[in-house]
Image (cartoon, rainbow, N blue to C red):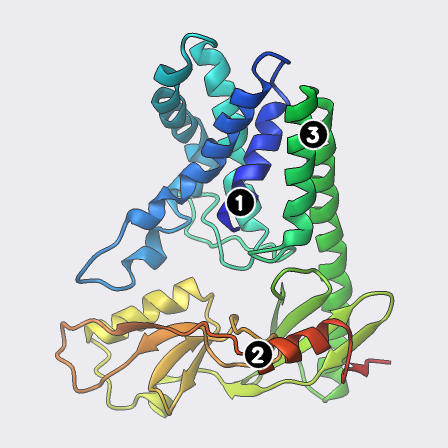
């Protein structure tokens, strides 16, 4: 998730181990520990543009790395606070903050290697958006109250909110999943594979992607008291023979596509106009396939040259209005 959410969740759990005299410092340690796993974004290469995809949310986010990552954080912080608390106290706070990070990331759709090095599966529970102010703001408020009153009871209230919101996301996911299958059936489709992800900042409006034969169908589903859907786009599944017949399968660009396939969990499309292999899970508007990132392919490149990493995340006023309309259910139809 976003850094503020990661830090505040880490602070809330760390503060549960605090007392009145150290609740501020413990909260700060938990905040830093909650951020620490994302230092893996510094692992980049000037010659390999997608190396970061393989290492972000990898070893530093693994459940098995938590004791070691926590120790690194504790050893870094301890010299600054050794006059007021023991290394054991700092380590416990670091452990509680660090341990939340990978688990919270796994709740999003990006994918987290929770079981590295024993598994390369990208765990995605898809029950919360990567950024969700409705989730984060109450945590910030409760942590602030805990600091002001020096009562860790409010930290437990924050933990209760965290758990409750994530559980609500699971309930919303299950409701939306049923609606997505209904939508596929209404079209006479067999949903061979399906994924759902909440749209930006909420767990009401969801992006639905399902595969029928050689095509992905992308729609938005709004799940509140009743369920409605906003019809979206479809795109043919990426296929070398159809989309890049001239690309040498032994080339570095082809290898990059396979690495990208792993990252995207095989939700690859192809934009012929841009010559772009895309991750169709991500778009600014949930019922669209306009890509946020992908690999630009040039079949005239040498065998050892990498593909180019492309990003495009602009959101104009018209798109923002469209998103707001979907969020309130405007121009969406009933599934029933």
Position in image of residue 223 (x %, y %): 78, 67
Q: Secondary structure at mark 1?
A: helix
- The residue singled out by tag 1 in the image is 4
Q: Secondary structure at mark 2?
A: helix
Sequence-first disc among 3 and 2: 3
Quadrant that contains the C terminus:
bottom right
Residue at screen point 77% across, 86% down = 186
Select label 1 or label 2 by which is in front: 2
Residue at screen point 35% across, 87% down = 274
Is 174 displayed left or right of 83 in the figure? right
Residue 62 in view of the camera? no
Inter-mark Cα distance, 3 to 2: 37 Å
How crowded is the residue under tag 2: few (<14 C-alpha within 10 Å), some, or many (20+)? few
The numbered mark at residue 145 is 3
Q: Is residue 123 above or below residue 276?
A: above
Is 244 displayed left or right of 36 in the figure? left
Inter-mark Cα distance, 1 to 2: 26 Å
CB-based contact (under 8 Å), mark 3 and mark 1? no
- The residue singled out by tag 2 in the image is 317
Sequence-first disc among 3 and 1: 1
């Amino acid at each position: 998730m976003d850094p503020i959410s990661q830090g505040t969740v880490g602070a809330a759990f760390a503060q549960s181990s605090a007392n009145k005299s150290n609740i501020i410092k413990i909260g700060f340690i938990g905040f830093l520990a909650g951020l620490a796993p994302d230092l893996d974004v510094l692992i980049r290469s000037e010659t390999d543009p997608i190396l970061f995809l393989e290492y972000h949310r990898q070893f530093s986010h693994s459940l098995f790395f938590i004791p070691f990552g926590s120790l690194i954080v504790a050893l870094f912080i301890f010299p600054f606070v050794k006059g007021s608390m023991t290394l054991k106290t700092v380590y416990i706070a670091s452990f509680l903050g660090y341990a939340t990070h990978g688990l919270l990331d796994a709740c999003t759709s990006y994918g987290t290697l929770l079981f590295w090095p024993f598994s390369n599966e990208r765990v995605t529970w898809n029950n919360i958006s990567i950024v969700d102010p409705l989730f984060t703001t109450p945590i910030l408020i409760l942590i602030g109250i805990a600091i002001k009153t020096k009562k860790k009871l409010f930290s437990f209230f924050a933990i209760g909110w965290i758990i409750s919101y994530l559980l609500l996301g699971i309930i919303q996911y299950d409701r939306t999943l049923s609606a997505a299958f209904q939508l596929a059936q209404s079209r006479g489709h067999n949903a061979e594979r399906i994924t759902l992800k909440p749209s930006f900042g909420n767990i009401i409006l969801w992006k639905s992607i399902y595969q029928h034969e050689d095509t992905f169908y992308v729609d938005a589903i709004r799940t509140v008291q009743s369920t409605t859907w906003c019809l979206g786009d479809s795109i043919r599944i990426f296929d070398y023979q159809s989309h890049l017949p001239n690309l040498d399968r032994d080339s570095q660009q082809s290898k990059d596509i396979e690495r990208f396939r792993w990252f995207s969990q095989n939700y690859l499309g192809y934009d012929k106009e841009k010559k772009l292999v895309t991750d169709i899970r991500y778009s600014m508007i949930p019922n669209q396939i306009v890509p946020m990132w992908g690999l630009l392919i040039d079949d005239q490149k040498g065998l050892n040259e990498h593909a180019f990493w492309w990003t495009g995340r602009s959101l104009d006023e018209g798109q923002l209005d469209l998103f707001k309309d979907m969020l309130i259910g405007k121009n969406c139809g009933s599934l029933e």
